[in-house]
Amino acid sequence: MSCTNPDRFVNICVDGQPVGTGNPLPISGGSGPGSNVVVTDIEDGAGDSVMDAVNDAVRVNVVAGGAGGGAVTIADGADEALGAKADAAAGADTGTFSVVAILKRLMARFTTLLSVLPAALTGSGNFKVAIQEAIPAGTNSIGQVTAAIKSINYTDAANRDIDVGGASQQVFAANAARTGLIIQNISDEDLWLDFDQAATLDTPSIRLIGGGLGILQFPDTTGRIELGAVNINGATAGQKFVAKEATDA
């Protein structure tokens, strides 16, 4: 092959020296930056020259790759080496790496992301975006509070009248199993209650106003209950009251 008598479909000369099997790039004496690269002939499939259509040799200026061994670069704001398929993944999010290395790091990051997503989001191989999923079959509790409902028994006081005016009398004996207590004054005069001590017609006993308005009920607002003996006192014999004691059934 020669630069004046090409024998290839595309014949190239660099600084006047032909490029061929016996003289590949880089050729001696040229192909560095500033070298004059000339396409001397282009032939069709029949071996006829088509350079007349071009009317002259096509000249290419070598701008990089001194001695023919430099890397190809891509300029987009900054030069980045394209890299090779065998490049390892980039070792950090910042730094200087080839494009191939960066792409491999992105693929590894995506694989890691998929591995940490909850199965509920990636079930059946699909990323779920529904706001509400169907409730699975079986027992499901959502915001449910389960409380046992207890049955109770109320027992009336054996004596529901004041026997002797001004004297304390027992309504209920102490009962550790007591779960509730209701006492109502249904007489016209006041009645007085106390626990574990004799009831008097004055403080410190508890006054139950007459006319059905006076009611004492346990458990109280704090959930506590009095378990001691319940005593009552009224000024007049015959005053009536209602007294009920509750225990678990």
Image: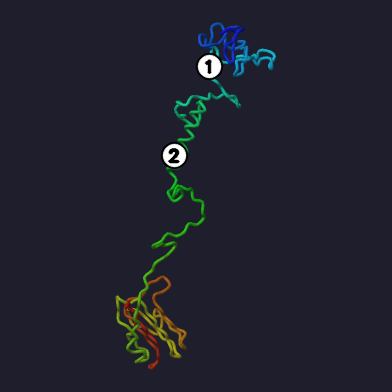
Circles 1 and 2: CB atoms closer than 8 Å: no
Quadrant where the N terminus is found in the figure: top right
Mark in the foreground, 1 or 2 = 1
Amino acid type of the residue tagged 1 in the rendering: Gly
| Front in this rendered view, residue 6 or 34 | 6
User: Is 27 above or below relative to 242?
Assistant: above
Question: Is the residue marked by circle 2 packed among few (<14), some (14-19), or many (20+) residues within 10 Å?
Answer: few
Q: Which mark is residue 70?
A: 1
Quarter holding residue 5: top right
SS of the residue under disc 1: loop
Real-space CA distance between mark 1 and mark 2, rounded to the nearest whole angstrom? 35 Å
Q: Which mark is residue 48?
A: none
- Residue at 35% across / 92% down in the picture? 164
User: Is 233 above or below relative to 44?
Assistant: below
Quarter holding residue 91: top left
Residue at which label 2 appears: 112
| x, y percent for residue 184 | 42, 85
| x, y percent for residue 248 | 32, 77
SS of the residue under disc 2: helix
The mark nearer the N terminus, 1 or 2, is 1
Amino acid type of the residue tagged 2 in the rendering: Thr
| Front in this rendered view, residue 147 or 109 | 109
Question: Is the residue marked by circle 1 packed among few (<14), some (14-19), or many (20+) residues within 10 Å?
Answer: few
Q: Is residue 59 left or right of residue 235?
A: right
